[in-house]
Amino acid sequence: MTHMMLIQKLAIAYAILFFAVVAVGYVPAFNDAGGNLLGLFSLQWYDDLLHAFSGVWALVAAFVSLRASVIYFRLFGAVYLFDGILGLLTGSGCLDGGIFIDGFRSLQDVELPTRFFANLPHIVIGGFAVWVGFRLARRPARPALA
């Protein structure tokens, strides 16, 4: 395989990140008495499956090609960013089906600080992925130094 481009390396970093998120959910020190990760959100088996799939997709894309990695960041980023913004605005995300099950949740159901910090990971991870897929991918490659 030829040398990997930065975007492919970032896809590998995303894969590691998602595998770590799944693993951390099973470490008691990171969960409160109610089973909430970092005291903010309850992750279910389907959340672990989604995170593991996101990691596998990133890893496969990184080893397939630069183009596959760019597509990953564009699609994945758009979906995760949308989920984070939707969760912040409505209190329910779409990836876990919350918007369909719980609908719009009031600030009495989910207080603003909790709502913000619970959705921040998807906003940051998705936002950075969108930037990688749509902005970084458009930059011309620098010639390699001799």
Image (cartoon, rainbow, N blue to C red):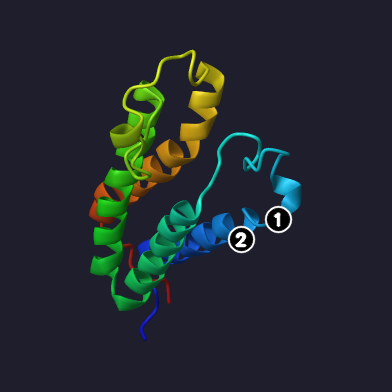
Image-based side of 109 in relation to 130, left or right:
right
Image-based side of 127 in relation to 65, left or right:
right
What residue is drawn where x is 73% and y is 39%? 33
The kind of residue on which mark 2 rests is Ala
What residue is drawn where x is 44% and y is 60%? 49
Residues under numbered marks 1 and 2 in contact, where contact means CB atoms less than 8 Å apart: yes
The kind of residue on which mark 1 rests is Val
Which residue corresponds to mark 1? Answer: 27
Where residue 146 sits: x, y (%)? 43, 77
In the image, 59 versus 34, the foreground residue is: 34
What residue is drawn where x is 50% and y is 17%? 112
Which numbered marker is on residue 23? 2
In the image, 112 versus 132, the foreground residue is: 112
Task: Provide the secondary structure element on which disc 2 rests.
Answer: helix
In the image, 95 versus 58, the foreground residue is: 95
Residue 78 is drawn in which quadrant? top left
Task: Provide the secondary structure element on which disc 1 rests.
Answer: loop
The image shows residue 98, relative to residue 88, as above or below, that is below
The image shows residue 22, relative to residue 143, as above or below, that is above
